[in-house]
Amino acid sequence: MPVSGDKIRQRYDRLAPWFDSLEGFLEGLVFHRLRKKLWAKACGEHILEVGVGTGKNFSFYPDGARMTAIDFSPKMLEQAERKRERKQLAVHLDLMDVQSLDYADNCFDTVVASFVFCSVPRPRKGLKELYRVLKPGGQLLLLEHVLSSNKFMAKLMNLLNPVVVRLFGANINRQTVKNVQACPFRSIYIDPASSDMIKLIRAVK
Ligand SMILES: C[S@@+](CC[C@H](N)C(=O)[O-])C[C@H]1O[C@@H](n2cnc3c(N)ncnc32)[C@H](O)[C@@H]1O
C-alpha cells in the first residue's frame, strides 16, 4: 500500500535535525559536485526551489535572482530558516506541497529540485504543477535518484523499497525521467554526466 503524504511529512519532520549529518559522507563524495552542475543552469528573474529541505542548495543560488523555496515538512523548513539567517540570504520560504501550489500560472523562470521526486506521494501531479507555474520557455532542473536500468539491481531496489520508504520517506524505485516525459514539456534533456541511478534532467516548457 502506498505511504500517505502525511506519513512522508512526519518522516522528514523526524529526520530534520539529523538530515545534514546523515548525508554528510555522500554530500562530499558526489552530491556537492552534482548540485553545482545543476544550479549552474539556473537563470532568470524569479527562481523556485522545491523541497528545499535544510537548505543544502543555498550556497549554489545564483546572485541577483529573486528566490522562493518551498517544503511540505515544517521541521525541514525550520532548519532552512536557521540556515537562511546564518547565511544572511534573501530567500522567501513557504510551507507548501508541490502537488498543490498556491502560485499563479506562468510565474517562474526556473524551477529546481534535488532529490525530491523520490518522496512526493504523487510525482506526476507535482510535476504537472511545476509545468503550470513555469513561464513559457521556462525550465525545470532536476537532480534525482531513479530506478536502475539493470534488471537485477531494479529487482533488488523494488524489493527493498517498502523498507526504505518506511524508514526515510524516499522511494528508491521512482522512474522520474518517465514521469517528466509524461508532462507536455517542449524538450527534455538528460545530462550525459548522469549515472545509471542519478539523473540530471532539464525540461523546457
Ligand atoms: C531527500 S530531501 C532533499 C532536500 C533537499 N532538496 C536536498 O537536496 O538536500 C526531500 C525533501 O523534499 C520534501 N518534500 C517531499 N515531498 C514534498 C512535497 N510533496 N511538497 C514539498 N516538499 C516535499 C521533503 O520534506 C524533504 O525536505
Image: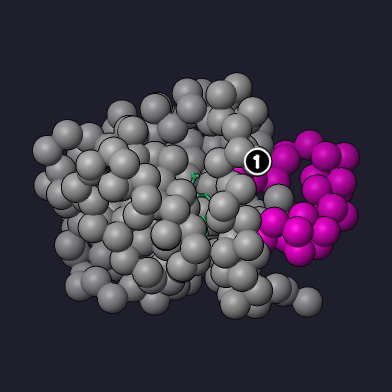
In this picture, residue 104 sits left or right of residue 128: left
Q: Does the magenta stretch include residue 104?
A: no
Q: Please name the residue shown 44% across and 53% down the image.
A: 79
Q: Observer-nearest residue: 7 or 48?
A: 7
Q: Give the range drawn in magenta.
A: 145-169
Q: Please name the residue shown 23% across and 43% down the image.
A: 89
Does residue 201 show up?
no
Where residue 27 appears, as percent x and y from the top left, is: 56, 30
Q: Please name the residue shown 37% across and 50% down the image.
A: 82
In this picture, residue 153 sits left or right of residue 69: right
Where residue 100 appears, as percent x and y from the top left, is: 39, 76
Where residue 87 appears, as percent x and y from the top left, is: 29, 38
Quarter holding the C terminus is bottom left
Per the image, label 1 sits on a secondary structure element best described as helix
Q: Residue 92 appears in which quarter of the rendering?
A: bottom left
Tally of marks:
1
For badge 1, the amino acid type reads Leu
Where residue 192 appears, as percent x and y from the top left, is: 50, 25
Q: Residue 144 appears in which quarter of the rendering?
A: top right
Quarter holding the N terminus is bottom right
Q: Residue 26 appears in which quarter of the rendering?
A: top right
Q: Observer-nearest residue: 94 or 81?
A: 81
Q: Name the residue under label 1.
A: 22
> Ligand 1: does it lie within 8 Å of the C-beta at label 1?
no
Does residue 133 show up?
yes
Q: Does the magenta stretch include residue 147?
A: yes
Q: Please name the residue shown 65% across and 41% down the image.
A: 22
Packing grade of label 1 (10 A; few <14, some 14-19, many >=20) is few
Q: Observer-nearest residue: 51 or 82?
A: 82
